[in-house]
Amino acid sequence: MIDESGLGVSPWVSSRISPGFLKLSHKQQIEWNSRTVSTLHAILVGLFCLYILCFDEAVNQDPVWGDPTLVKINVGITTGYLISDLLLIFYYWRAIGDKFFVVHHLAALYAYYYVLGQGMLPYFANFRLLAEFSTPCVNQRWFFEVLGYPKTSRPNIANGVLMAAVFFMVRIAVMPVYYSRMYSVYGTEAFYRVSFGGRSAWIFSSICLDIMNIMWMHKIARGCYKVLRSSQRLKAQTQENGKTD
């Protein structure tokens, strides 16, 4: 039986950090707990990913077959999270069900199976985890929304601009780096040592995830633009009313 709190600690901590948590509906509390775990996972995995990219010479020198020990730990953490999150999504489908999240999780798990099972492609598997740095801002946007913060409030605007900037940097701007590194190993001996299934999982999941990232970036950019426009209009109206008074 899946614990309805997602994690028993989340409701206890959330109710003390934000008293508004207790006023949320049962459905909202379920999603709140899910997003709290998501944020903690993103921070842990994102920092570990950055450490590996900066200091793991074996993986950086041989992106296809370099020593995957640290990457396996990071991918293992993410795999555990994705499986538990999928179970929660299916169990609470009416509350937090989202087909895009299901596709995203399954595509990632399909690729990570080869990393954990055969130790291949550690650099590319770890590189994808940079995307987790955008997750806290995405979740914070939802927290502000259910707590009743106006979209034009300063915390919401600041988080929205930060979310758009970070999402672009870790999911869109890094695409040329990722695919140029992929191209650099294409056709090499190391590349052909990867099984056909592994190559298919690598290429298919990368394209699938990045198509979704582009779609999400488009939505985030439009939302951020609308909020900034609304904020400017309100500021202009306030200034006009002040002059009239």
Image (spheres, rainbow, N blue to C red):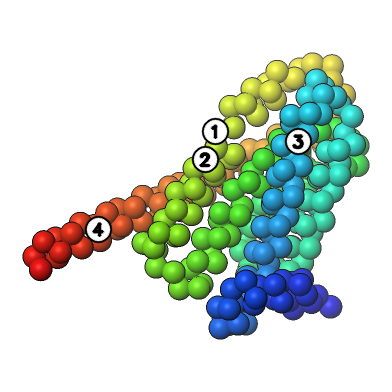
User: Which callout, 2 or 4, points to the residue nearer the camera?
Assistant: 4
Distance from label 4 to label 1 (Cα)? 32 Å
Amino acid type indicated by mark 3: Tyr
SS assignment at label 2: helix
SS assignment at label 3: helix
Which mark is drawn over residue 51? 3
How many C-alpha atoms fall within 10 Å of the one at disc 4: few (<14), some, or many (≥20)?
few
- Whether tag 3 and tag 4 are in contact, CB under 8 A, the answer is no
The residue identified by callout 1 is 173
**Quadrant that contains the C terminus:** bottom left
How many C-alpha atoms fall within 10 Å of the one at disc 2: few (<14), some, or many (≥20)?
many
Residue 150: percent from the left, percent from the top?
39, 68
Amino acid type indicated by mark 4: Lys
Residue 120: percent from the left, percent from the top?
85, 32
SS assignment at label 4: helix
- Whether tag 4 and tag 1 are in contact, CB under 8 A, the answer is no
Q: Is residue 233 left or right of residue 173?
A: left
- Whether tag 2 and tag 4 are in contact, CB under 8 A, the answer is no
- Whether tag 2 and tag 1 are in contact, CB under 8 A, the answer is yes
Q: Earlier in the sequence, mark 1 or mark 3?
A: 3
User: Which callout, 4 or 1, points to the residue nearer the camera?
Assistant: 4
User: For the point 83% across and 38% down, which residue is it?
Assistant: 71
Is the residue 163 above or below the residue 3 in the image?
A: above
The residue identified by callout 2 is 168
Residue 116, visible in the rendered structure: yes
Quarter-wise, where is residue 143 in the image? bottom right
User: Which callout, 2 or 3, points to the residue nearer the camera?
Assistant: 3
Of residues 26 and 215, the one drawn nearer to the viewer in this rendering: 26
The residue identified by callout 4 is 235
Residue 206: percent from the left, percent from the top?
67, 38
User: Which callout, 1 or 3, points to the residue nearer the camera?
Assistant: 3
How many C-alpha atoms fall within 10 Å of the one at disc 1: few (<14), some, or many (≥20)?
few
